[in-house]
């Protein structure tokens, strides 16, 4: 998965040849536990912390994070769609046109789109060096957009369809008998279909690619996707628009348990300061079937992301260890295991080898279990990542 941000790499408390020296760590050891005050954490703060809970103008982003859990991973449409191509929060109309035509932007603005979320998957990996599916692939882009009310969503869906149809005189409508309220179009001879369907205060936007240009086949894949997506939306309770500002930024304190060098200035952001459910981790996997099973077996319910680190909450400590084993097994041959800091129990570390891509992954990645939590820390410098491992363990211990 593409790295979500760069972090400060300055490291304090380093001696000759990278030997770490002690720095003061707050905390009081529980009976039978490691005394985290002895850990070498550098300048990373590890005291119990709380971020501001006020959403302010960012309530819609928090709503989008809530929505993420009801935008279905592709594997739930069809098990053949096993390759996750990621998911992302859509903060505004500018973000939305990464998935919709440019002509959609004024419609989204006029109909006052609130927020959205997208999940993308395929039946195979993208060709080497490319960021789009191969022509012979089946892929689905599932976008759910929230509007102020059902009336606005209904108008938006029709206007978005009209805008797409107008892009080419060769575009033609297709009808779904199973979902007659959906608007569908394709260009005969091109193996793709676009769909807009209003549902309650949402518009479901789909883009499906198949290996062959067959209108009936494309509609059948739209039907399958809607059959998975609509029941998921039925389980979601939208926050009234006039209550979005009351949503809490970090109500369970998970963001505050992620070790970072600087706690200042963090506001809700889809990639750098966010809390998601297990669907986020499923859609990011190269094997969604295996990842979904891992989420279920370990009881993952939340993952908190701050900068390029995260904390995932699972059922218990045994599940935390199982999650780490599963995540490491999925990283691929571009990582090699290296020794983790000896004074941090059960930590595991990896190093990107010469086959890896430093534009996509950090050089070092480590996994830190503590009770029902798994911290994941990254860095391009080994001394820094080792301090982060210690800091993540200490912060989790001090936060409970």
Image (cartoon, rainbow, N blue to C red):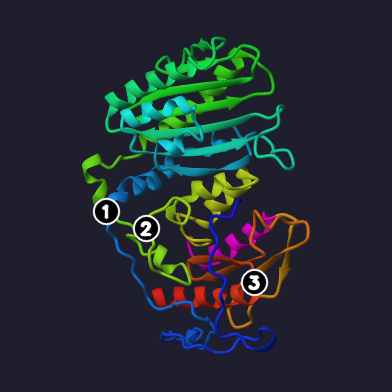
**Boundaries of the magenta span:** 315-331
**Number of other residues with Cα within 10 Å of mark 1, as a class: few under 14, some 14 to 19, many 20 or more:** some
Q: Residues under labels 2 and 1: Cα distance?
A: 10 Å
Furthest toward the right, the residue is: 354
Residue 267's tag is 2
Vertical placement of 284 versus 164: above or below?
below
Q: Of marks 2 and 1, which one's residue comes earlier in the chain? A: 1
Rendered image quadrant of residue 212:
top right
Which one is nearer the viewer's eye here, 228 or 250? Answer: 250
User: Residue under circle 1?
Assistant: 56
User: Residue under circle 3?
Assistant: 381
Instruction: Residue at 44%, 71% (x, y): give it.
Output: 262
- Secondary structure of the residue carrying numbered label 3: loop
Residue 327 at least partly seen: yes
Residue 239's tag is none
Which one is nearer the viewer's eye here, 127 or 265? Answer: 265
Residue 396 x, y percent position in the rendering: 45, 73
Vertical placement of 354 versus 58: above or below?
below
Instruction: Residue at 43%, 40% (x, y): give it.
Output: 70
Residue 269 x, y percent position in the rendering: 42, 53
Q: Residues under labels 1 and 3: Cα distance?
A: 36 Å
Residue 78 x, y percent position in the rendering: 59, 32
Instruction: Residue at 41%, 32% (x, y): give it.
Output: 231
Instruction: Residue at 36%, 38% (x, y): give it.
Output: 235
Q: Of marks 2 and 3, which one's residue comes earlier in the chain? A: 2
């Amino acid at each position: 998965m593409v790295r979500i941000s760069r972090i400060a790499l300055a490291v304090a408390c380093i001696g000759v040849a990278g030997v770490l020296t002690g720095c003061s760590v707050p905390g009081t050891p529980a009976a039978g536990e490691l005394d985290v005050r002895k850990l070498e954490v550098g300048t990373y703060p590890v005291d119990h912390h709380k971020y501001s809970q006020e959403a302010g103008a960012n309530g819609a982003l928090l709503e989008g994070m809530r929505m993420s859990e009801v935008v279905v991973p592709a594997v739930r449409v069809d098990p053949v769609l096993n390759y996750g191509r990621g998911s992302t929060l859509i903060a505004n109309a500018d973000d939305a046109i990464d998935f919709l035509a440019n002509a959609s932007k004024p419609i989204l603005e006029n109909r006052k789109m609130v927020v959205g979320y997208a999940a993308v998957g395929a039946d195979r990996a993208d060709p080497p060096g490319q960021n789009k599916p191969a022509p012979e692939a089946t892929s689905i882009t599932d976008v759910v957009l929230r509007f102020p009310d059902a009336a606005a969503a209904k108008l938006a869906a029709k206007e978005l369809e009209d805008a797409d149809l107008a892009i080419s005189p060769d575009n033609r409508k297709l009808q779904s008998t199973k979902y007659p309220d959906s608007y569908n179009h394709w260009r005969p001879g091109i193996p793709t279909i676009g769909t807009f369907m209003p549902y309650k205060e949402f518009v479901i936007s789909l883009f499906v690619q198949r290996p062959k240009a067959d209108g009936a086949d494309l509609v059948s894949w739209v039907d399958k996707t809607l059959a998975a997506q609509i029941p998921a939306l039925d389980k979601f309770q939208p926050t009234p628009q006039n209550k979005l500002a009351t949503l809490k930024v970090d109500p369970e304190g998970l963001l505050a348990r992620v070790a970072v060098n600087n706690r200042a200035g963090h506001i809700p952001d889809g990639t750098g300061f966010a809390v998601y459910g297990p669907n986020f981790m499923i859609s990011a996997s190269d094997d969604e079937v295996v990842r979904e099973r891992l989420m279920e077996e370990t009881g993952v319910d939340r993952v908190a992301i701050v900068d390029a680190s995260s904390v995932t909450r699972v059922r218990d400590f045994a599940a935390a260890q199982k999650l780490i084993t599963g995540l490491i097994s999925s990283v691929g041959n571009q990582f090699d295991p290296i020794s983790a800091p000896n004074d941090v129990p059960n930590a595991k570390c990896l190093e990107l080898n010469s086959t890896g891509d430093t534009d996509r992954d950090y050089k070092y990645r480590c996994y830190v279990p503590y009770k029902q939590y798994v911290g994941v820390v990254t860095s391009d410098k080994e001394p820094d990542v080792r301090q982060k491992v210690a800091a993540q363990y200490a912060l989790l211990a001090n936060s409970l």
